Amino acid sequence: MTELVPTTCMRCAVGCGHVQQAPEREYGLETVRGDPGHPVNQGLACQRGVSETAHPDGEWLTRPLERKGDDLVPTTWESALQRASEGLGTALEDGGDSVAVLGSGQQTNEAAYALGKLARGGFGTRYYDANTTLCMASAVTAYYDAFGSDAPPPTYDDIPDAETHVVWGANPAAAHPVMFRWIRQSAAGDDSELLVVDPVHSETAAVADHHVPLEPGGDLALARAVLARVVETDRIDEAFVDDATIGFDDLRAELPDAADAAEMAGVSMSDVDRLAAALADPTLLYWGMGINQSVNGTAAAGALIDLCLATGNLRPGSGPFSLTGQANSMGTRVCSSKGSWPGHRPFADPDHRRDVAEAWGVPVSRLPDDPGPGPVGIVDAIGDDVDAVYAVATNPVAGMPDATRVRENLEEAFLVVQDAFRSETVEYADVVLPAATWGESEGTTTNMERTVSRVRAATEMPSGVRPDLTLIGQLADRLVPDLFDDRPEPEAIFDEFAALTAGTPADLSGISYDRLEAERAVRWPAPEPDVAGGYRYYEGDEADDAAASTPEPTDESWSFYTRSGRARFSSGTARPLPEPTDESYPFTLTTARRPDAYNTGVRTREDEPPTARISPATAAAFADDLEAPADGREDGAAVADGRENGAAVADGREDGAAAQYARVVSRRASVTVSVEPDAAIPDGVVWLPIHHPDVNDLTLPDVDPRSNEPNFKQCAVRLEPPQERDVRAVAEASV
């Protein structure tokens, strides 16, 4: 019997501890379950994290590939690495910016750090992104604006103590099930409640005490309406604002009329008042991609932080809490050298650049002096500045907006793809390097509440697969000799980047593999071996009050990484949405996660078209244009999906109704979809899952002007009848 290996789930950013076990004589994982000894989840685990770790549906890459004409053919490791280094090296002859590097929040801390070191210190390119710009950059920018530092102040420890839970533009019931269980347990207490702000009546909204269904893109207007009502109803925590913040008087003078802002957001004043009143109690305000992925993402995230500051919700049991999607997005923000140098060292600060260059043994002139334009700008630069691209554990062909343009540009570049699965991006590669995945890799990861824990290999790797860290080191040896002193090993690389964070806001220098072995998980900042982080920016002594049910703070103070030492209110204003609806494109497309699918679908691949959810009223108005596949089945027979003929598809249709198909058309592309009438979707909105590789053909490449995060959540579309060849293709795939 093989041993049970403790590790961390890499499915989402909650950071649950798992135990994994390999079969006796095969590769892979036979047992995956929650780890009762892990301090984060104490044995809890969601089914999707277990199943996608043990039994992913994607096509594994098991041998290196290189392009011969139009085909990718198997090759040796030596040939693949030589071809990759020659192609990247040729581009580097024109300067470091000729190579772009795309990383991922799926990498370990060690691989993310090594990739950033290669990109910034080896190549010297500004065209580098660790994938966080696609999901968290707006929240990061808003945190820096407010606190002078990244990452949420609260931790999971604050969830039980909050009386109000406001989930805004996020769906943790689908995206973070274990964390959402804690939220629901807390909200179920006496005098506690769960409020959800979302255009869609999501899985989270379905169990909330109240749902506020705003218009898509109306978040900033609603946040300002709520703050205006907080002011009007004298709910400002004047003592906190006076003692710990700056900028409130300027913001108050610019606030809109609450009723006018509520109308812009598409909500009633009673909803505004419900939110304003809720903030009077200790409140955790969570948000996700519905806020971040917008041209107004930074301003909207800043406005949510403003609500917390104005009401004094910056104490234990309260505060702004951005929900991170990818498992190690937080880790890449600390160690990858994307938006800051390791430890959140300011990118443009000459002293920090000099320290990093000295630690890496490279000339400071090689380090870029700005963090670059983000993924959309990187794709735009292909064919101009950029001649070659190295993509690691990411799938830009499916995951970036306006994906047709991404494919066209990548076809013009020399492309090296390093991945565990045969993604859409692999098909455009010149060289493919098969990488290890969950259960096969060693290292660490950092969850959304700043907790670092070990990632361990429970199974052997096939001979044709190598860890990300090994492959990064092998390319570095060929392209930038001596960048790494020795062959990169996880523990040595961890010690290197942890040392670089010493004395920074994100100090990991007190964490080591030995400490993680003993404690299982440690939250930063951890500047000493016996210190771990808690609630950030706050210090308070609590005294027991016999008349009170909870301890009361008696001496509170706050300190922030800003020049004044105070938290800063924001001043962001709304930009017009880049593509409003009109007569030609009368519907708003929004995209989001499904509970049962993974990122761009590489672990949960489906051959069927994506399912478009629309309101029953929209479906009825469009009914004459919908079409069922002419496949010879009797009316009412189910699409071949494992159900018995006649069983309803789980999409709101009556039992026995056949699937219906349409085309969703934007100004950039059209996509065949199955149509699911769903009362959870508001009229005028088309909902599509982010996981299907066709969906981002439709979306916009416009970005937030400060964070460079794309406007994934809103663009204008129309519905059309499917073309005959599309219906025929669906029918052939379904029988």
Image (spheres, rainbow, N blue to C red):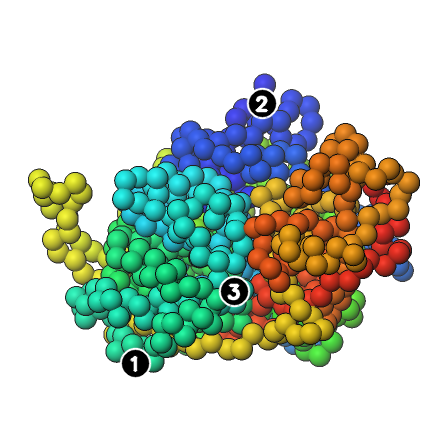
Quadrant of the frame with the N terminus: top right
Q: Residues within 10 Å of mark 1 (few under 14, many from 20)?
A: few
Label 3: which residue? 215
Task: Between residue 125 and residue 248, name the one nearer to us.
Answer: 248
Residue 395 percent location from the top left of the image? 67, 56
Label 2: which residue? 2
Mark 3 or mark 1, earlier in chain = 3
- Kind of residue indicated by mark 3: Glu
Residue 393 percent location from the top left of the image? 64, 53
Numbered tag placed on residue 253 in the rendering: 1
To which quarter of the image does residue 654 belong?
Answer: top right
- Residue at x 52%, y 40% (from the top left corner): 9
Task: Between residue 637 and residue 643, name the one nearer to us.
Answer: 637
Q: Secondary structure at mark 3?
A: loop
Q: Are marks 3 and 2 in contact (CB under 8 Å)?
A: no
Q: Are marks 1 and 2 in contact (CB under 8 Å)?
A: no
Quadrant of the frame with the C terminus: top right
Separation of residues labelled 3 and 2 (CA atoms): 53 Å
Q: Is residue 260 visible?
A: yes
Name the front one of labels 1 and 2.
1
- Left/right placement of residue 682 relative to residue 151 reads right
Q: Residues within 10 Å of mark 2 (few under 14, many from 20)?
A: few
Residue 26 percent location from the top left of the image? 69, 27
Tally of numbered tags: 3
